[in-house]
């Protein structure tokens, strides 16, 4: 899918990075990575251990391919529970999926981004219009256990303003 290659706007990344100090971008390319350490499709964060690049207690950034986010959610949960690595994952809002069910079974944070849709970037860094879905950010903490998620709501303008500062 074309939107599998969309890049995260730097303001959105910076807003979350200011809070979680990401050590690695686990779903990146050589052209669009947002952290110094990153996994490309060839390096496959779905096959390799994140702990080779991230210390226990640290966080990774993940803007996964939207055509198939389930394996990314599964990997993030496994890395959290087995290696103590937290994740912030940017996803389309869709609580009717198998991956969403997994998130409702662990102690994580689901942040619904309201009052707008993220304008992702193309390969040249230009905003792509016509995003027809809203987004949410999932925060899976290190050593997440079974439990209920906490939900929050943030406006897109709040995130963009915070990331621009």
Image (spheres, rainbow, N blue to C red):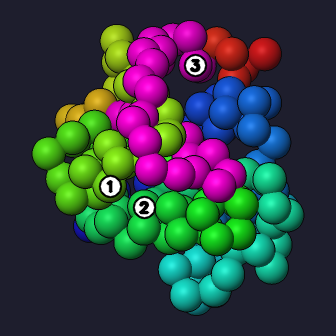
- Residue 12: give x, y in percent of width and height: 60, 32
- Residue 32: give x, y in percent of width and height: 63, 60
Give the residue drawn at x 78%, y 16%.
165
Write down the residue under mark 3: 159
| Helix, strand or loop for disc 1 | helix
> In the orientation shown, which residue stands out farthest toward the front?
146
Would you place residue 50 above or below residue 116 in this image? below
Answer with the quarter of the image where residue 35 lies. Answer: bottom right
Answer with the quarter of the image where residue 164 lies. Answer: top right
Give the residue drawn at x 52%, y 80%.
46
In magenta, the rendered stretch is: 135-160
Mark 2 vs 3, N-terminal side: 2
Question: Which mark is nearer the camera, 3 or 1?
Answer: 1
Residue 102: image tag: 1
Give the residue drawn at x 59%, y 77%.
45
Question: Which mark is nearer the camera, 2 or 3?
Answer: 2
Mark 2 and mark 3: span between their CA atoms? 23 Å
Mark 2 vs 1, N-terminal side: 2
Please state if 88 lies on the left or on the right of 3 as rendered.
right
* Residue toward you, 22 or 35: 22
Residue 73: image tag: 2
Mark 3 vs 1, N-terminal side: 1
Would you place residue 145 above or below residue 20 in this image? below
Q: Is residue 75 magenta?
A: no
* Residue toward you, 119 or 59: 59
* Cβ atoms under marks 2 and 1 closer than 8 Å: yes
Mark 2 and mark 1: span between their CA atoms? 8 Å
| Helix, strand or loop for disc 2 | helix
| Helix, strand or loop for disc 3 | helix
Mark 1, residues whose alpha carbon is within 10 Å: few (<14), some, or many (≥20)? some
């Amino acid at each position: 899918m074309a939107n599998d290659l969309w890049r995260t706007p730097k303001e959105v990344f910076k807003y979350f990075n200011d809070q979680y100090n990401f050590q690695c971008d686990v779903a990146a390319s050589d052209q669009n990575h947002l952290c110094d350490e990153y996994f490309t499709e060839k390096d496959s964060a779905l096959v390799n251990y994140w702990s080779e690049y991230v210390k226990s207690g640290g966080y990774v950034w993940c803007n996964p391919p939207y055509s198939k986010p389930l394996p990314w959610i599964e990997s993030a949960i496994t890395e959290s529970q087995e290696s103590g690595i937290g994740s912030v994952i940017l996803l389309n809002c869709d609580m009717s999926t198998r991956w969403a069910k997994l998130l409702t079974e662990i102690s994580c944070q689901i942040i619904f981004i309201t009052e707008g849709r993220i304008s992702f970037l193309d390969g040249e860094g230009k905003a792509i219009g016509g995003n027809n879905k809203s987004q949410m950010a999932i925060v899976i903490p290190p050593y997440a256990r079974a439990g209920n998620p906490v939900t929050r709501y943030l406006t897109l303008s709040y995130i963009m303003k915070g990331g621009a500062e």
